[in-house]
Amino acid sequence: MLALDYDAFDQDMAGGWRGLSNRGCTAEAANLIRDWRTAHGSDAPDIRLLFWHEGQMRAEIGQKQQAIALFERSRKPAEIDRVWGWNRYVDGTIAFLRGDRSGLERARAALAALPKPPELAQTVGPDGKPTKLQWPRNLNILDGFRRCWKQPYRQALACAVPTSVKKG
């Protein structure tokens, strides 16, 4: 597993660390992400996403403080966040883990207010046809945290209404 390239390790929805997670081996998946990240260091195309994914695994097994520290390391630079709102999603997730309802509400409101980037006005799906992407991204997850307040992270994450790509 440590020899896999980034895409095979992190982006394959059935392989890499996700293969362990899908079998319920969440702690092992978290440790594997940590070990892969350590072995590959800055060679990973998006190291921040690996911090996020390890944080998710740690949150699922109740390691809240470790998860929060990892989520903090997943933050994007301000110029990217200004457009895509990743850090607002991070803020809301951390507020949920801390039991800070007002912090979750503030983060959700900030994310909901984010204008849609012009480059998303017209996108093309894998079939080559125009699609409309759900905007803002991850708002459904923060809404799931609101709906399932006080539930463990894994259960609250499952409360998010799935987003679907709508044909446009």
Image: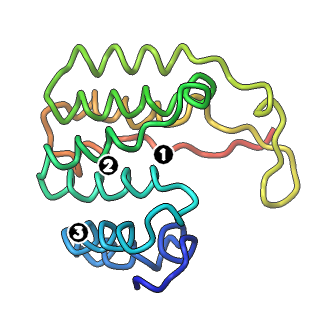
Disc number for residue 26: 3
Quadrant that contains the C terminus: top right
Q: Residue at x 32, y 42 (%)?
A: 71
Q: Against 97, is 58 above or below?
A: below
The image shows residue 130 at horizontal and vertical percentages of: 85, 44
Mark pair 2, 1: CA separation: 9 Å
Q: Residue at x 22, y 48 (%)?
A: 67
Quadrant that contains the N terminus: bottom left
Q: Residue at x 33, y 35 (%)?
A: 144
The image shows residue 139 at horizontal and vertical percentages of: 46, 30
Specify the quadrant of the image occupied by residue 116. top right
Q: Against 153, is 103 above or below?
A: above
Residues under numbered marks 1 and 3 in contact, where contact means CB atoms less than 8 Å apart: no
Q: Against 160, is 9 above or below?
A: below
- Judging depth in this view, the residue of 41 and 46 nearest the camera is 41
Disc number for residue 158: 2
Label 2: how many residues lie within 10 Å, few (<14), some (14-19) or many (20+)? few
Give the structural element (helix, strand or loop) at label 1: loop
Q: Which residue type does callout 3 highlight?
A: Thr
14 relative to 23 in the view: left or right:
right
- Judging depth in this view, the residue of 51 and 42 nearest the camera is 42
Which residue was labeled with disc 1? 162
Mark pair 2, 3: CA separation: 15 Å
Specify the quadrant of the image occupied by residue 164. top right
Name the residue at the front extreme.
42
| Labels 1 and 3: the sequence-earlier one | 3
11 relative to 126 in the view: left or right:
left
Q: Which residue type does callout 2 highlight?
A: Ala
